Image (tube, helix red, strand yellow):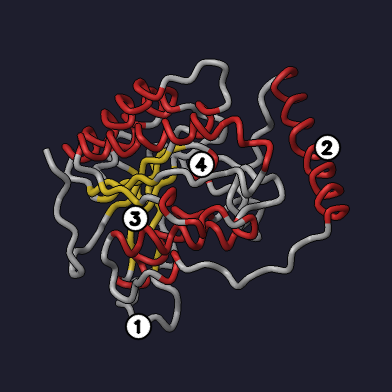
Amino acid sequence: MSAPPVTASRRFERYVAIGDSSTEGLDDPDGAGGYRGWSRRLAQRIADVQGSVLYANFGVRGKRTREIRDQQLAPAVALHPDLATVFCGTNDLVRPRFDAGAIADDVAHMQRALIAGGATVLTFTLPDLAPVMPIARPLAPRIRALNRALRSACADSGAILVDFAAHAMASDPRLWSDDRFHANAMGHERIAAALAQALALPGTDDAWSRPLPAALAAKPRERLAAEWEWTRRHVLAWAWRSLHGPARRIAGPVEATTLRRIVAAPGTGAPVHDAAAESVRLPGA
């Protein structure tokens, strides 16, 4: 079954996002102790165009592809979305055993299940991480294999693919947070803009893909100091957590049975909804 066609006039009523920490929104703080992230930003873009949209985010940091399939897919499908995003595989990259074929099968399964329920499904690839953190160079073959798996899954299921790996801009360190594992606010905004263009939302263009202005090159001593500080604060801390238990969750995802209404921002000209936000529960939830 192929995804419903995307047209500039199509309205989305229910948007559900499943995935890992990227979908959860790290590292794009919302100013209220949680995270905004590209999925929430995409929901806001949709609301600004059409007045409102119901939105649920199942993203949980640390989850591998099979865990997302096993834990998030069924409750996501139960919300009957007409738009869904599926992004995963990053946590699979750093595990001792990496199976790109299994990832492709799992992602295609999730995409097909959501499409069968009437959803337009979006997925995107991971860019080259070497410019962001040189230590990631040994992961390059796995990243390429992951991206081939995601492309294969989309070709198989009919999901829409945004191929960030094809854009050098996505590897600009200025779009990544201090930990270099997650996008920062500007990076999340670019992801949301790319997905919005893929959905043909009115007013979108390819500005998200354009490179940032050239930056001044850091001196060798400054680069060395920055690499050591990053290793001390993030790599060693991650290794410690891996040995001594899972990382503490700072903010949780939206409840599995809850859709939250996102409304248009003031001044957008979109139809006004009479409530700033509301939760919608399914019967029997």
Placement of 96 over or under 174, stated as above or below: above
Answer with mark 3 or mark 2, whichever residue precedes in sequence: 3
Which quadrant holds residue 229?
top right
Marks 3/2: CA–CA distance? 41 Å
Q: Position of residue 246 (x, y in %)?
A: 66, 24
Name the amino acid type tagged 4. Answer: Pro
Tag nearer the camera, 4 or 2: 2
Query: Which circle marks residue 31 in the picture?
Result: none
User: Do the CB atoms of the residues marked 1 and 3 lie less than 8 Å apart?
Assistant: no
Residue underneath mark 1: 269
Q: Where is residue 243 in the image (x, y as percent from the top left)?
A: 73, 18
Badge 1 local density, few (<14 within 10 Å), some, or many (20+)? Answer: few
Query: Which circle marks residue 253 in the picture?
Result: 4
Q: Is mark 3 on a helix, strand or loop?
A: strand
The single residue placed furthest to the left in the displayed view is 1
Q: Nearer the viewer, residue 280 or 21?
A: 21
Instruction: Assign the N terminus to one quadrant of the image.
Output: top left
Placement of 129 over or under 241, stated as above or below: below
User: Do the CB atoms of the residues marked 4 and 2 lie less than 8 Å apart?
Assistant: no
Residue underneath mark 2: 232
Which quadrant holds residue 101?
top left
Residue underneath mark 3: 54
User: Do the CB atoms of the residues marked 4 and 1 lie less than 8 Å apart?
Assistant: no
The residue at the point 26 percent across, 49 percent down is 160
The residue at the point 22 percent across, 63 percent down is 11
Answer with mark 4 or mark 2, whichever residue precedes in sequence: 2
The residue at the point 68 percent across, 29 percent down is 247
Name the amino acid type tagged 3. Answer: Leu
The residue at the point 18 percent across, 69 percent down is 9
Marks 3/4: CA–CA distance? 15 Å
Q: Which of 18 and 97 is in front in this view?
A: 97
